[in-house]
Image (cartoon, rainbow, N blue to C red):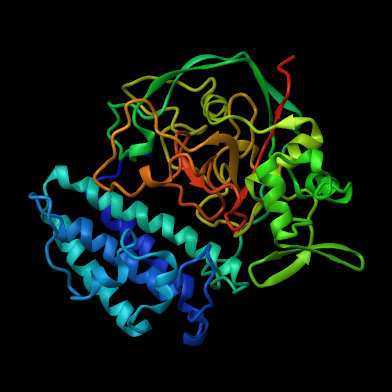
């Protein structure tokens, strides 16, 4: 449940999302768009075409009788239907070249904007769905650039000045209690099916770190032999660590004078106070055991994010720590303002009333909770969004530096398999005892 977006706002947001989509690969020559098979990415040209196909399907081809109208491309369903085409098969499809892909994207977008002008109010949610789908894929495109060690697009504006930092540390204390978790049926905003609906959850007293774990804090685990200590890992995590011969985070390397981290195509000295990113849930769990801590549950995370904010069924003032408006640059590292995670103590203006920093933006945060339906779950029209991934994925909360601010909010549920290290994800921890 994000903020409501009007008909005019949808059109502007679609244009904004498309500019970011096209920017992801615009600076790369054609030969760099032919990439080897990797389980965590999609072929670049396939993903671009899929974004257009999804928009066309829901905004232009959807029919009241449950069937789909024709596509602008005869072969579109055979090329881009993610539910029907196995991931590995996408590398062997007869995809159009870059020029043909961009032509299809442009033709769909022109038709979408015309349809947006005349559709009835009930259909607007399908245009919002297409918008948010593109926003999510845009973050995936940035993840692909990171995975492949490709450069990011040149910035159109100079980088922002370094944001202010706080001196806050330690844990925030929560008395717990019952709260209503999930989206309200009264919200005027678009709601994904896995956020439906608000239901009572009881939270026991707990203590949560005001900051996420930093590179320096995780480095102490690495240098203390944490990757070799069986006692730090559960069975699934140890199996994963052993099979992958993991000895440190994926984008770190030891050099003669210390450690480096890779950000896209560049290796830089490891910044100790920078927020840790690109670790799996297994690595997060292992650090917590080593530190005598634990990951928060999904319910604890949402409870903490919304604690002491105004709440009610008739408004969304607990949408974010700053209320029901978009964040300022001084409040959240979203929309790729800085292009990387910030210092763990940065952006105190966006802290929650309880003193938690960067709950929205900077890095996604692993939780201890398996991705599962809320009580009474009913799949939405886009049936493949949530249901196929229940019980095999882990919930993440919060958003990263590459997440769009119009997408993320205090109830937003992201989900990845716990072995994924390519997501822009880190974590914060909770004390084992509330005392």
Q: Is residue 89 above or below residue 248?
A: below
Q: Quadrant of residue 301?
A: top right
Which part of the image, by quadrant, shows the N terminus?
top left
132, 386: nearer the viewer: 386
Left or right: where 378 falls relative to 367: left
> Would residue 137 be visible to someone looking at this image?
yes
Q: Quadrant of residue 50?
A: bottom left
Pick the quarter of the image with the C terminus: top right
Outermost residue on the right side: it is: 257
x and y percentages locating residue 137 in the rendered image: 42, 59
- Write the residue at 40% across / 72% down: 90
Q: What is the x, y in percent for residue 17?
A: 38, 60
In depth, the one of 379 and 188 nearer the eye is 379
**For residue 78, what is the image quadrant?**
bottom left
Whole-percent x, y for residue 345 in the image: 71, 41
Q: Residue 132: horizontal and vertical position, in percent?
A: 36, 52
Residue drawn 68% across the image and 40% down it: 212
Is 415 on the left-hand or right-hand side of 260? left
Q: At 66% across and 33% down in the image, what residue appears?
A: 295
Above or below, 209 against 35 in this view is above
Q: Is residue 395 left or right of residue 384?
A: right
242 or 133: which is nearer to us?
A: 242
Q: Is residue 346 visible?
A: no
From the viewer's perspective, is residue 138 above or below residue 353? below
At x 22%, y 75%, the residue is 75
Outermost residue to the left: 65
Relative height, residue 347 to residue 304 (above, below): below
**How many labels sit on residues?**
0
């Amino acid at each position: 449940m994000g903020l409501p977006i009007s008909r005019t706002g949808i059109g502007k947001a679609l244009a904004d999302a498309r500019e970011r989509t096209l920017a992801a690969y615009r600076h790369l020559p054609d030969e760099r768009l032919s990439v080897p098979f990797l389980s965590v990415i999609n072929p670049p040209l396939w993903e671009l075409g899929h974004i257009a196909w999804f928009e066309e399907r829901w905004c232009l081809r959807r029919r009241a009788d449950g069937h789909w109208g024709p596509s602008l491309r005869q072969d579109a369903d055979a090329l881009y239907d993610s539910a029907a085409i196995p991931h590995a098969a996408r590398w062997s499809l007869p995809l159009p070249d870059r020029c043909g892909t961009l032509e299809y994207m442009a033709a769909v977008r022109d038709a979408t904007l015309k349809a947006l002008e005349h559709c009835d109010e009930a259909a607007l949610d399908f245009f919002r769905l297409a918008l948010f789908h593109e926003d999510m894929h845009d973050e995936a495109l940035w993840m692909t650039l990171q995975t492949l060690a490709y450069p990011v697009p040149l910035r159109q504006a100079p980088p922002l000045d370094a944001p202010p930092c706080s001196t806050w540390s330690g844990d925030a204390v929560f008395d717990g209690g019952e709260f209503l978790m999930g989206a309200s049926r009264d919200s005027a905003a678009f709601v994904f099916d896995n956020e439906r609906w608000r239901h009572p959850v009881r939270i026991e007293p707990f203590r949560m770190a005001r900051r996420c774990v930093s590179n320096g804090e995780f480095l102490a685990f690495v240098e203390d032999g944490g990757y070799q200590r069986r006692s730090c890992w559960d069975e699934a995590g140890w199996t994963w660590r052993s099979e992958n011969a993991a000895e440190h985070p994926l984008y770190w390397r030891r050099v003669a004078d210390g450690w480096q981290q890779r950000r896209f195509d560049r290796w830089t000295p490891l910044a100790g106070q920078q927020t840790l990113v690109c670790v799996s849930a297994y690595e997060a769990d292992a650090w917590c055991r080593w530190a005598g801590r634990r990951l928060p549950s999904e319910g604890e995370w949402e409870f903490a994010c919304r604690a002491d904010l105004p709440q009610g069924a008739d408004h969304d003032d607990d949408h974010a720590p700053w209320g029901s408006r978009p964040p300022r640059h001084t409040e959240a590292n979203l929309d790729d303002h800085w292009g990387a995670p910030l210092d763990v103590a940065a952006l105190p203006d966006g802290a929650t009333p309880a003193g938690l920093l960067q709950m929205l933006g900077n890095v996604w945060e692993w939780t201890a909770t398996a991705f599962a339906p809320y009580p009474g779950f009913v799949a939405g029209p886009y049936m493949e969004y949530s249901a196929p991934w229940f019980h095999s994925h882990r919930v993440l909360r919060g958003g990263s530096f590459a997440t769009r601010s119009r997408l993320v909010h205090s109830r937003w549920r992201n989900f990845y398999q716990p072995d994924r290290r390519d997501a822009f994800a880190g974590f914060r921890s909770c004390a084992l005892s509330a005392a």
